Amino acid sequence: MQTDKTFRLRISQAHGTFSKVISAITSTGVLFGNITTRHIGRKYMYRDITVEFQSEEQFRTTLAAIESVPGVIVDGVVDEVLNRHEGGKMIYRGRTEAQSLAELREIYTPGVAKVCMAIQADPSLARRYTMAGNTVAVVSNGTRVLGLGNIGPQASLPVMESKALFYSQFVGLNAVALVLDAPGVDAFVDTVARIAPSFAGIHLEDIRSPDCLEIEQRLIDHLDIPVMHDDQHGTAVVAIAAMGNMLRAGGKTFAEAVVAQVGLGAAGLAIALLAKAAGAKGVIGVDPNPGAARYAATKGLDVLELNRAVGQADLVCLTTGQPGLFKPEMVRPGQMILALSNPRPEIEPPDALRAGAAFAADGRNVNNILCYPGMFRGAIAAGARSISVGMKLAAAKVIADAAMDGEILPDPLDRRLHESVATAVEAAAKAGVQPGGPRPSTTPSGAAPETTVDQHR
């Protein structure tokens, strides 16, 4: 597992010692991060050197190489990933404070009763006078965490905190990370439905397939606030943005391209359907699981076996979780390849390019962060009760247009991008979604069949 660690070193002032340390580290084949000078003393320089490791064995090899350099003392090693998460990443604070007894009476009793009565008379006022107007619940049961599988709710909490963090950072929404001890569909849906009055939106995350499909649909049917499973639709939006720029670089549009979606798990199916909605000339699905193939067919997708599908495709997108599945000899000259499985793609981009692909990329830059903060911000601002295909396509266009020349996607840390996504989604919501009250609770006639596991984000 990739991780960053920082060596806290005392390095002798003797000439050439520091260069020997750098050479020792370089010889182990690792990548450097930051190098920071903490203090320069009479005998020693105190420096922190951060290094990226792919395995624990690689770390031990590098540590031994450093310790072998004369005049160097290792004072400690800091695991930067664990250090970054120390104490958790989220903290919840009030937006106001009581500075006087008068303010205390306004914020709490007896003043708060006036607000309660106003909301009782008009429940829509909860969005104006409580956190329910600007807070998203990021909810998981930890049954399918990226690259880790079914690790359970508590172990998945760091991921939910990370997702929640970016709401406040990029679009100014509050977000609460919630993990449920509810591995089954009914218990999960019931729990989320019961807590929903406290929130403006429900962000579903890291739920196994096919449960995630039924959970999302039942919550959409039952609640009057936006619900989105990010592993499906956030991935699809960003993938469509990337595809659009790949096609543009190759002188094509969606209307001129046949897309093969290999892997029809939750995310793969969402990508295929959104590519179809984006106007692709054709969309072909591939999945060896008969149940997944049949379910995709009910959604209007043509499903073929792998070799036939990729033989017809101008652009191949893969979300199978199977490294090396797509062999170089399968690449058709001029084809475009987007291999999204993490941590290792179905084909390495350099291998695809050598085999004749016009463009190839993997999932390292296809990050859902580009989509979900702005998506929920725009939906909430519009008062939308669901997230439509039009809203997803509006977000994809903004994301694609923000990429720099030569890149397929923009910088996810650019706050202006997230604000632009929110604006576009809000406009699309107002144009195509009528705000309204809750819909009746319905249960799908049958759960989606088990599908292959998508390993990407």
Image (cartoon, rainbow, N blue to C red):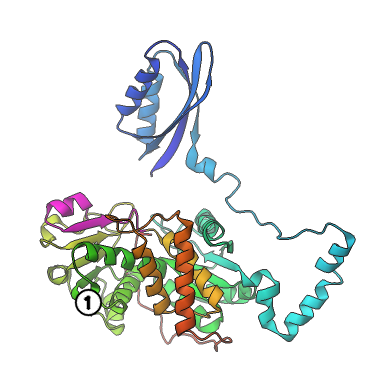
Q: Which one is in front, 449 or 244?
A: 244
Name which residue lies at 57% across and 67% down. 136
Q: Is residue 65 left or right of residue 12?
A: left
Residue 403: tell me if it is visible.
yes
Task: Name the residue beneath numbered marker 1.
Answer: 255
Point 32% across, 28% down: residue: 26
Choose between 448 and 347: the one closer to the eye. 347
State the extent of the magenta-drawn residues as a range: 346-366
Could you tell me residue 98's position as x and y percent?
A: 81, 59
Kind of residue at badge 1: Ala
Q: Is residue 171 left or right of residue 3?
A: right
Helix, strand or loop at disc 1?
A: helix
* Corner quadrant of residue 129: bottom right
Eyeballing the image, is 387 above or below 396?
Answer: below
Q: Residue at x 68, y 82 (%)?
A: 123
Can residue 215 be seen from the camera position used here?
no
Picture quarter with the C terminus = bottom left
Front-most of residues 297 and 258: 258
Q: Quadrant of the N terminus?
A: top left
The crowding category of the residue bearing disc 1, from other C-alpha atoms within 10 Å (few below 14, some 14 to 19, many at least 20), is: few
Where on the picture, by quarter, is residue 199?
Answer: bottom right
Which residue is rendered at x = 17% and y = 51% of the image?
Answer: 351
